[in-house]
Amino acid sequence: MGAYLYLAKMKLMAFLTYRFEVITSLGTNLIILMASVFLWKTAYSGTDAISGVTESQMLTYTIISVLLSSFFSSNIEHSLQERIAQGNIALDFLKPINLIFAYLSEDIGISMSSVVSKLIPVLIISALFVQVPLPGSWLSFLVFLISSMLSYLILWLINALIAVLCFWTVQLGELKTVKDGIILLISGKIIPIWMFPKWMQKVLSFMPFQYVYQTPLSIYINRITRQEIAFSLFIQAIWVLFLSLALIMLWNKARKHVFIQGG
C-alpha cells in the first residue's frame, strides 16, 4: 500500500509543478463554466421548469458538473500508450507491484492535484459571479461524495479498458477521441439524460455512461428520491465490479500477448 501512496504523492507533486498547464486548464474550465451558465439562463428565459427541473437546479447541475470534470482526471491512456510504444512495458511487468493499481494510484494523485489547482479555484472564482448552491443537508452531500467516487472509478475503468487496447494497436489514434465524445454526449456531463427522448433514456440506462455524471449530479440537486438514490448507488457498484472484472480479464490476456511477442 505504501508504494501506491508514494506513486500518488509523486504524481500530485509533479503535476503541481507545471504552472502554465495549470493556469491554462483553469482558464478553460472557467470559460466552459460561464458559457454553460449563460446558455442555460437563456434556455430558461420565460420558463419556470424544464423536465421538472427549475433554473436554479439546472445552474447547480452545471456548476457541479464542471467541478466534477476538474476532479475526474485520468492519464492512464497516455501513460500506457507511451510505455508500450517505447517497449518499456515488458520491464514494468517485472516490477513487484500490481501495474493496474500503480496506474490508478498515479491518476488519483493527478486528481488530487486537480482539486488544488482547478476545482477549488474554479469554485472560488465562480462564486464571485454565480451563487454556488449548497446541498440540502450534510447527509445528501455525503451520499453525493460516495456516488462521485463510484463515478470516478467507472470513468477510470472505461479509460483503462480503452488504454489496454494499445497492447494490440500500439496507438489509440481516434479511438480515444471517439470515447471522449461519447462520454461528453451521453454521460449527462453537458445535457442531462432526462432531456433525451424516452426511448434513448431506456437504451442509455443499460450503459455505464450516465452513471459517471448524471447520477451524482441528480443526487446533488435532489432530482431523484431516496429509493432511486439507493438503486443508483447499487447500479454504480455493479458497474464498478463488472468493469473491474473485464479489465482484469483483458489485462491478463494482454500480458500473455506481451510474453508471446517477446519470445
Image (tube, rainbow, N blue to C red):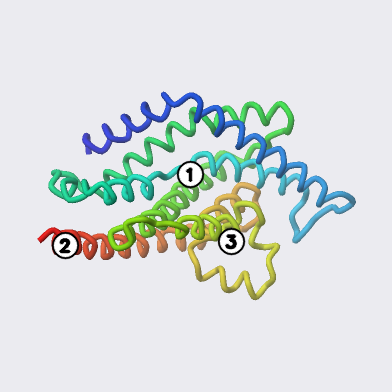
40 to 8, vertically: above or below: below
Residue placed under numbered mark 3 in the picture: 186
Residue placed under numbered mark 1 in the picture: 72
Q: Earlier in the sequence, mark 1 or mark 2?
A: 1
Query: Extreme right residue here?
Result: 46
Work out how far the residue at label 1 is from the one at label 2, CA to CA, in angstroms: 34 Å
Q: Earlier in the sequence, mark 1 or mark 3?
A: 1
The quarter of the displayed image where residue 164 is located:
bottom left
Q: Earlier in the sequence, mark 3 or mark 2?
A: 3
Please state, as top left, top right, bottom left or bottom right, where the C terminus lies in the image. bottom left
Query: Which amino acid, by three-letter code, is at mark 1?
Result: Phe
Query: Which amino acid, by three-letter code, is at mark 3?
Result: Ile
CB of mark 1 within 8 Å of CB of mark 3? Answer: no
The local crowd at label 2, few if under 14, some if 14 to 19, many if 20 or more residues have their Cα within 10 Å, is few
Q: Residue at x 56, y 58 (%)?
A: 187
Q: Residue at x 55, y 34 (%)?
A: 25
Q: Residue at x 73, y 42 (%)?
A: 37
Depth check: 140 or 42 in front?
42
